[in-house]
Amino acid sequence: MSIKVDVGTPPNGYEEWTTIQVQFHGFADLPTTRGGEIESPAFSCFGHQWVLVLCPGGSAFPESSEGYVAVHLRHKSMYSGSIKIQYGLGVRVNQVYKEVQQSDTFGPVGNGLVGRRFKNFAKRSTLINASVEGTLVIEIRMRHASTDKPIIQFIPTNPINKNVLELFMDEDTADVVFEVGGQQQAKGRKRAKTSTTSSHAHRLILKKGAPTLSEMCGVSEEGITTVSIKDVTPDIFKHMLYYAYGGNYQKKSWVEMQKRSSMLVISTGLFI
């Protein structure tokens, strides 16, 4: 059961989504023959009859990708005329709501569009994990489509750049450690060795983001490989490594940038 509470006054023309939950019990045990259909009982929305069709083994035409489940929203009314709606079909996976959205004009059965098939709705393994005590719940959200406003389709942001950057300097998952520094520094007549700084990295990312550094790591071995880097300061090396992970150099000030830029460019050319 859903309970909605308005905070403030809805704007003129505002229309709530109507939500229908279709529950497929024992989803994991449903037949997975390609093209096989499980049709829900008919339900009513906006004075029209609808059914949701599930293809646990995927659609035969158009053909689903291997391992994917297809869903099909069908308009079943014969005498109610046409209706233009905006709708979404979604499931909740690990507390995250995933949905496909569409806007269509459905006609009476035998006249016009009577259904919309999503051949690659979701992987079967994903839907099994999303099932609650063996029951797969698919939410159908509907509302009348506006005739004067474009439908804004939901396009998820690709998280790969963010995910790679989160691995930057991550000691728990790193399989390479660069010991940076340790060069000789003159102090009068004596020469002292500077301390080194550890920078953690990943072979797989270096292979594409910094091929020269990757080659310096040698053949892949079990455990963590340690590589010594000299003739570059630890902070410059860290900025260069951050760039290899897809990050951008943050200029704290133009003065600082002028001091560092030439060394950063040289280092990037040497190691990337």
Image (spheres, helix red, strand yellow):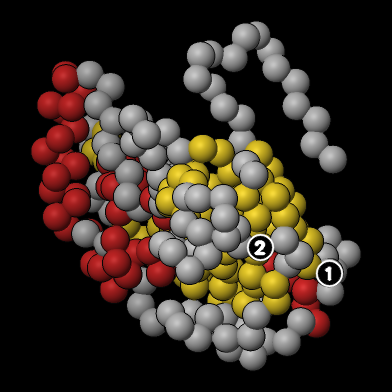
**Is 189 or 236 nearer to us in this picture?**
236
From this viewpoint, which residue is outermost toward the right?
133
Q: Is residue 161 left or right of residue 224?
A: left
- Residue at image position (13%, 48%) is 266
**Is 18 or 154 nearer to us in this picture?**
18
Query: Residue beneath label 1, please?
Result: 25
Which quadrant would the C terminus be assigned to in this image?
bottom left
- Three-letter code for the amino acid on which mark 2 is drawn: Val
Q: Position of residue 158 (x, y in %)?
A: 41, 52
State whether residue 148 is above or below residue 236: above
Tell me where residue 190 sits by quadrant. top left
Q: Is residue 241 left or right of residue 226?
A: left
Tell me where residue 30 sits by quadrant. bottom right
From this viewpoint, which residue is outermost toward the bottom?
33
* Residue 34 in view, yes or no: yes
Going from N to C along the chain, the mark reached first, 1 or 2, is 1
Question: Which label is found at residue 1?
Answer: none
Q: Bin the neighbour count of mark 1 within 10 Å (Cα to Cα): few under 14, some 14-19, many 20 and up.
A: some
- Residue at image position (47%, 55%) is 106
- Residue at image position (84%, 74%) is 26
Query: Residue beneath label 2, please?
Result: 51
* Residue 172 in view, yes or no: no
Tell me where residue 28 sits by quadrant. bottom right
Q: CA distance from mark 1 to mark 2?
A: 16 Å
Q: Position of residue 220 (x, y in %)?
A: 44, 80
State whether residue 115 is above or below residue 28: above
Q: Nearer the viewer, mark 1 or mark 2?
A: 2
Which quadrant would the N terminus be assigned to in this image?
top right
